[in-house]
Image (cartoon, helix red, strand yellow):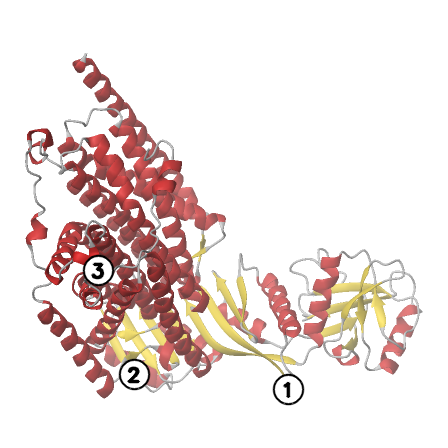
Amino acid sequence: MAKSNKTNGKKGVIFKSIILIVLVTIIGFLFVPLFKGLKFGLDLQGGFEILYKAETIDGSKMNNEKLTATYKTLSKRIDSLGVSEPEIVIEGSDRIRVKLAGVKDPDEARTQLSTVATLSFRDVDDNLLMTSEVLQAGRAKIGQDQQGNPAVSLSIKDKDKFYAVTKSISEKESGKNLIVIWLDYNEMTDSYSKEGNQCGTSGSNCLSAATVSQGFASDVIIQGNFTQEEVSNLVDLINSGSLPSKLTEISSTTVGASFGEGTLNTTLIAGIIAILAIMLILILVYHYSGFISSVSMMIYTFLVFGVFWIVGGVLTLPGIAALVLGIGMAVDSNVITFSRIKEELLKGKSLSTAFREGSKSSFSAIIDSNLTTIIVAIIMFIFGESSIKGFATMLIITVLVTMFTMVFLTRFLLKIFVNTGYFDDKTNLFINVKSKDIPNVSKNEQVKENKFTKINFLKHRKITICISLLIIVVGGVLIGVKGLNLGIDYKAGTSITVVSDNKMSIKSIREDLKELEIPTDNVTKNDEEIYIRLDKTLDGEKVKEVNSYFEEKYEAKVNIGVVSNMVQKELVKNAILSVLIALIGIIIYVSIRFKFSYAVGGVIALLHDVAIMFSVFAIFRFEVSSMFIAAVLAIIGYSINDTIVSFDRIRENLAKEEWKKLTKEKFEEICNRSIGETFTRTIYTTVTTLLPVVILIVLGSSGIFTFNMAMLFGLIAGTYSSIFIATIVFMQLEKKNLGKEEKKKKVYTDDIEEKKIKGINC
């Protein structure tokens, strides 16, 4: 009978394994059309992005109504450019950001967008009758005709001229007695009689054709078979055309199509290699459980892109970086669970019991660590500019999908294979725990001690603190003497990246810049890429000239970014604000879930990580850009994630002790043992998160080099601080409370949630 059960179990494992392989294969085939169906940002397919400041020429205040009208004018103009899926976003009270990915002629688009809207009134033969000067500026509004239907109400300023024109038109024969309203009329392409140029349709500059039955010397109503939405749009467009406003370009990015395509290809290759490397590590370390985790990771990647497609997200370079980073962090959820299962096995428990209790005990640490990352990502989204918003959006999606796939789905799959019974005596095959290491508790065999619990991590804490202080002090001195190597995001100016297979040297590029009448000594070279930094902001015409020059001379791929002083000041303010709010948010959350001393220890460790990152960038003179701040925020989320896992174990071990009788020596021993018990998990998580970052540094695009370098040093600092800084601070704060009655704090466990998940962990 036993042999029969084992045979059935083996058949079950083989059958279910085949199903998983088929599932992964199907996902692989579906992934290609899904990826092609995504919208790509301009950094991945070329195009340009402009941030405008909207101002009224007459000095009046730019209110929300006027800004919305300007927004709709830009939308109308972009329709005529034939750009698919443009992004137009109102930012703040007077700014509009326009992203045109894949636009073929950025210079033509820039010219057309920035020109002041022109409203004109013409007859059916396209003869000019009146301009917007006859109207009260910005005074068109939604009205009603005599039947109560939606109509457009126009406020007339020059009543005499308006009467003369309308009287003249009303006397013409039927079909000719029309006044045609145009926005940005183009004599070369626009005509009322032109076939397909129907007024009010997308891509047409014709707004409306109104029948005139008499002369009007007062305010008038444009009526027709309008819907409420059509009237609202028409009012906005007329107002924008009659509004004396101007758009000032305060920042821009121009990316050549070939530059974007090359970036996408190199980043994707790096991402695929990183995913395959992580899967290999998981299988080597956790055997069959690692295989199941790899399947979950494939599903996770597919679902992340699927959710991103559903919400209509635009995939950018920072977004891909967030995805690859998210994979490393997602694996952490499985590593925590697998580590707990292994611990229970090494206590002498059966595989099914170890799975159940290990899954349960790991749940709260996983929830807490992922929620803190979401807090930071939300703050990034609120305060970040466009590229950081893209990073934050992808990071939020990856964390949410992690909670489903890498927690619930992985546990569900594990339970299916545990229930076969096939692995009951094959724990080494299942999760890399040798049978000889599992004690027989019924025979009083001793539990094998974790080798890392014998290490005194806190013994040399003075030395570790001094190492951190030395790096921070050196970095601080260099920042004070030389300052940081600020990118154009925080210094304002222009950045130019030129990539070409043809020979380029720093000397030849400097000669080119002289010819272009652009003075700068800030030219660096890395392989086939030349980086140029200018303190001055180039205008649209100069950007066009520079772009054409390098493309023609070197057959180069060119990327040009321009940031004004106005934007630079706001980016600095938002960067500081976002970091501070992230720290406050973490203090509040950790204080609620743990206690205040844990929160203080965690936040001081985070400040340590931030200081280390700035110091390293000051020492090696890496450029500090907006993506560096994104990396700082990402490390804050990652580091607190790491710290919480250690804190969760400390809290669990302290709960077994009677606080009143706890000595300083015993308290320190518990903290040290807790670090040792989670050390293996810490190392595996750090490796799986560092791996994609290192691969992206080696193989990825230069566009995220700064981000990846910041992540590299930040991850190392975050792991270091979780072990040597956070716990030390917590210990020092709590030592003064030893021997006192501990205040009972309600601890939210995962018991209820766990019992609700039928078939996964019950």
Distance CA(mark 2)–CA(mark 3): 31 Å
The front one of 388 and 434 is 434
Q: Residue at x 33, y 62 (%)?
A: 591
Q: Is residue 88 visible?
A: yes
> Mark 1 sits on what residue?
59
Q: Quadrant of the N terminus?
A: top left
Residue on which the image places disc 2: 511
- Report which quarter residue 744 is drawn in: bottom left
- In the image, residue 618 sits, relative to residue 586, either above or below, namely below
Vertical order, 435 against 672 (above or below): above
Whether the residues at callouts 3 and 1 have beta carbons within 8 Å, the answer is: no
Total marks shown come to 3
Q: Label 1 vs label 2: CA separation?
A: 44 Å
- Kindly identify which residue carries mark 3: 698
Above or below for 674 versus 516: above
Choose the circle earlier in sequence order: 2 or 3.
2
For the residue marked with disc 3, what is the amino acid? Val
Image quarter where the C terminus lies is: top left
Indicate the secondary structure of the residue bearing disc 2.
helix
Question: Who's the residue at 37% across and 56% down the image?
Answer: 395
446 vs 514, left or right, is: left
The x and y percentages for residue 116 are 63, 77
Give the secondary structure at mark 1: loop
For the point 78% across and 78% down, which residue is it?
A: 135
